[in-house]
Amino acid sequence: MDYNKVSAEYDSYSKEATSDWLIGYPRALEILEPLKGKTILDYGCGTGKVSRRLRDQGARVIAVDISQPMLDIAQRDDAVGINYRHIDSGGIHFIEDASIDHAFAAFVFCNIVSREDAVLIMKSIQRVLRPSGRLIILNANWEDCNGREFISYKFDRIENLVSGQKVGLILKSSAPLRVENYFWSAQDYQAMLTEAGFHTVASHRPLAENRTVEWKGEDKYPLFLIMEALKR
Ligand SMILES: C[S@@+](CC[C@H](N)C(=O)[O-])C[C@H]1O[C@@H](n2cnc3c(N)ncnc32)[C@H](O)[C@@H]1O
């Protein structure tokens, strides 16, 4: 998916994105609490919506992305206190070994075409984490949601999900955006993270809990897959 071309559309989707804001991001970030005073790497920060959330919760944020147009929007919005950097894939050489408390990668690894590239990025993140630092990976949960529709997502129906295959979904908002991703299963992530040197790896599949929202199945089918990997 070329985010250089859809940076404005993605930014406007992400400002609505009910399911992300009420389930995906909060459930992923609560694993890292307390955030105050921590140094967090937002890997694949896009237009910076999570970077801003992390900063507002008192974290020092280093936010990196391969797409300059996505970063341009992030920097234009409200960049105070956030260290945005344009990188090549996995290119976080400017960050010292073991200097980051935790890292977060939201909807990034679903854009990585090969297992080898994903492991390289995970290794680069593992290097900069302090001992006991965590990498949290948030993605849409294809294994439980194939073919389903939710408030903010409509998944294509794929007959046989195969690791690394291209999958399509619609990000629903007032201006729907069709995106193409690559499918990696929880088992794939587990294996890749272990290969990258992470010590323990857990997976989480949160359901919606907020009863004031009229869900479209988010309370029955876990829309998000959260991988939590710990550096020894
Ligand atoms: C779907 S957007 C998610 C942005 C942000 N994390 C969020 O939750 O809104 C995916 C982002 O990952 C970035 N990206 C894709 N491949 C990358 C890579 N190999 N290294 C760093 N960033 C990458 C894209 O440029 C894009 O900004």
Image (spheres, helix red, strand yellow):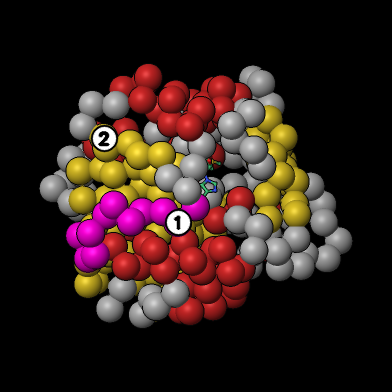
Q: What residue appears at the point 36 percent right and 25 percent down from the top-left corner?
A: 75
Is residue 95 part of the magenta span, yes or no?
A: yes
Assess mark 1: CB under 8 A from ligand 1?
yes
Frontmost residue, 16 versus 8: 8
| Residue 93 in the image: above or below residue 7 | below
Q: Is residue 23 left or right of residue 173?
A: left
Q: Examine the image and state in which quarter residue 201 appears.
A: bottom left
Residue 17 versus residue 169 in the image, above or below: above
Main secondary structure along the magenta-highlighted residues: loop
For marks 2 and 1, the one nearer the N-term is 2
Measuring 40% from the left and 59% from the top, which residue is drawn there? 136
From mark 2 to mark 1, how far is it between C-alphas? 19 Å
Q: Position of residue 34 (x, y in %)?
A: 20, 53
Residue type at tag 1 = Gly
Query: Does 160 appear in magenta?
Result: no
From the top left corner, tell me how far across and down residue 73 is, in percent: 44, 24
| Residue at image mark 1 | 90
Q: What residue is disc 2 on?
A: 82
Which residue occupies 26% across, 35% down?
A: 82
Specify few, some or many for label 1: CA neighbours under 10 Å numbering under 14, 14-19, or 20 or more. Answer: many
Query: Relative to 159, is 43 above or below?
Result: above
Can you give x and y, in whole percent of width and height, for residue 124 in the image? 39, 63
Instruction: Please tell me whether mark 2 sits on a helix, a strand or a loop.
Output: strand
User: Looking at the image, do the residues carrying marks 2 and 1 touch, with CB atoms under 8 Å apart?
Assistant: no
Residue 13 seen in the figure: no
Furthest residue in direction left, as rendered: 37
Question: What is the magenta range?
Answer: 89-99
Residue 137 point in image, percent of width and height: 46, 58
